[in-house]
Image (tube, rainbow, N blue to C red):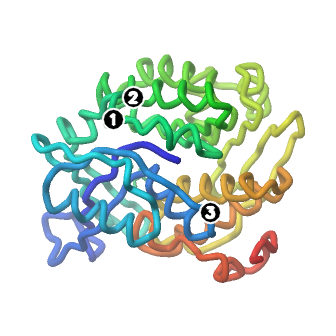
């Protein structure tokens, strides 16, 4: 089960500033739904809660997620606010730029009463990110309410802080995210985010700090350097899977999906991290925030990785 904002996404097809784009591709993007799609493609069932406008982008969000098999029955439609929009340009061969048009969006008007409590209580995992609480006060209340319902029902809470500087400043983000960290069993983060939360320090100290905050599974994603973790007091490091990057956006969401699927399947900590690294790698080989996420049969695409095809 996950919760968040999914937007329309317009991407320039060519490497150039967006104002010179000859054509744009229309798709959807949202960190939490990207992760849900990744989990769903690997065969676990997922549901997404969010709020879209009564407009074409909102219908695109819902039909795309439905098409991917993600349950959107708990999503709501706001008659008075638009679906958010994101623009994405490949500014150079390696640099991707994004711009948001989401202030006042339907998702920013999420409220706790829109939550489907029964669905949350029935889930194995509730996955949230630090993007949703940055959208508005009511969206922040909604995330905390969802986390409380999950905790009360014994549902594991997974958090990706996913700091977005375009949405809020580091001080406000740090105080809210520290609070969410303290309510999460699983935290999937980056070194920069951990430094924002707890100050700059060596990576292993960050992991211990997360452990001390009550996180049982603390994972730091390190991009091309792999990932490090402290999972049930076991220290682990896994390498990244080397790939040619076509579009880095969505790598973290894919990583989260791999970790969560392996966790739901009860796989050992190392396999969870290996699958996470594998998914993050596959995701960046394709243009689009989630389109490249693999099915189970495609898991061997990049070579070595845990054999979880069955
Ligand atoms: O991780 C990728 C997401 O960030 C992207 O798909 C869109 O949710 C999004 C955001 O807020 O940036």
Secondary structure beneath dot 3 equals loop
Work out whether residue 225 or residue 261 is closer to the camera in this orientation and state it. Answer: 261
Q: Is residue 12 above or below residue 71?
A: below
Residue 91 horizontal side relative to residue 309, left or right: left
Residue 78 horizontal side relative to residue 119, left or right: left
Q: Is residue 71 above or below residue 245?
A: above
Q: Is mark 3 within 8 Å of ligand 1?
A: no
Residue 67 horizontal/vertical position (percent): 39, 72
Residue 87 horizontal side relative to residue 67, left or right: left
Q: What whole-number distance in Å separates the C-alpha atoms at marks 1 and 3?
A: 24 Å
- Circle 1 residue: 114
Name the residue located 13 percent from the left edge and 64 percent from the top edge.
Answer: 19
Residue 209 horizontal/vertical position (percent): 73, 23
Secondary structure beneath dot 2 equals helix
Residue placed furthest toward the left: 80
Residue 142, numbered label: 2
Residue 110 horizontal/vertical position (percent): 30, 34
Residue placed furthest toward the right: 234
Q: Is residue 180 above or below residue 231?
A: above
- Circle 3 residue: 44
Work out which quarter of the rendered image holds the C terminus and state it. Answer: bottom right
- Residue 301, picture quadrant: bottom right
């Amino acid at each position: 089960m996950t919760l968040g904002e999914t937007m329309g996404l317009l991407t320039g097809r060519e490497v150039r500033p967006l104002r010179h784009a000859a054509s744009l591709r229309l798709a959807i993007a949202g960190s939490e739904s990207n992760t849900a799609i990744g989990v769903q493609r690997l065969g676990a069932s997922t549901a997404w809660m969010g709020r879209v406008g009564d407009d074409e982008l909102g219908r695109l969000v819902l039909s795309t997620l439905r098409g991917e098999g993600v349950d959107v029955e708990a999503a709501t439609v706001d008659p008075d606010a638009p679906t958010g929009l994101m623009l994405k340009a490949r500014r150079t061969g390696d640099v991707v730029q994004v711009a948001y048009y989401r202030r006042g969006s339907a998702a920013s008007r999420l409220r706790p009463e829109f939550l489907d409590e029964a669905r949350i209580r029935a889930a194995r995992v509730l996955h949230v990110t630090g993007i949703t609480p940055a959208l508005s006060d009511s969206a922040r209340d909604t995330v905390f309410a969802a986390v409380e319902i999950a905790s009360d029902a014994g549902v594991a809470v997974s958090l990706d802080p996913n700091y977005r500087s375009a949405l809020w400043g580091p001080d406000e983000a740090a105080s809210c995210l520290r609070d969410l960290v303290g309510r999460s069993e699983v935290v999937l983060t980056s070194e920069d985010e951990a430094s924002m939360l707890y100050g700059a320090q060596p990576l292993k100290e960050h992991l211990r700090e997360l452990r001390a905050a009550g996180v049982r599974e603390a994972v730091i994603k390190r991009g091309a350097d792999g990932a490090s973790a402290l999972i049930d007091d076991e220290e682990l490091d896994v390498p990244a899977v080397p790939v040619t990057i076509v579009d880095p956006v969505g790598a973290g969401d894919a990583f989260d999906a791999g970790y969560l699927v392996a966790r739901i399947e009860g796989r050992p900590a190392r396999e969870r991290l290996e699958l996470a690294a594998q998914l993050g790698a596959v995701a960046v080989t394709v243009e689009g925030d989630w389109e490249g996420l693999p099915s189970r049969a495609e898991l061997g695409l990049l070579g070595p990785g845990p054999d979880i095809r069955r």
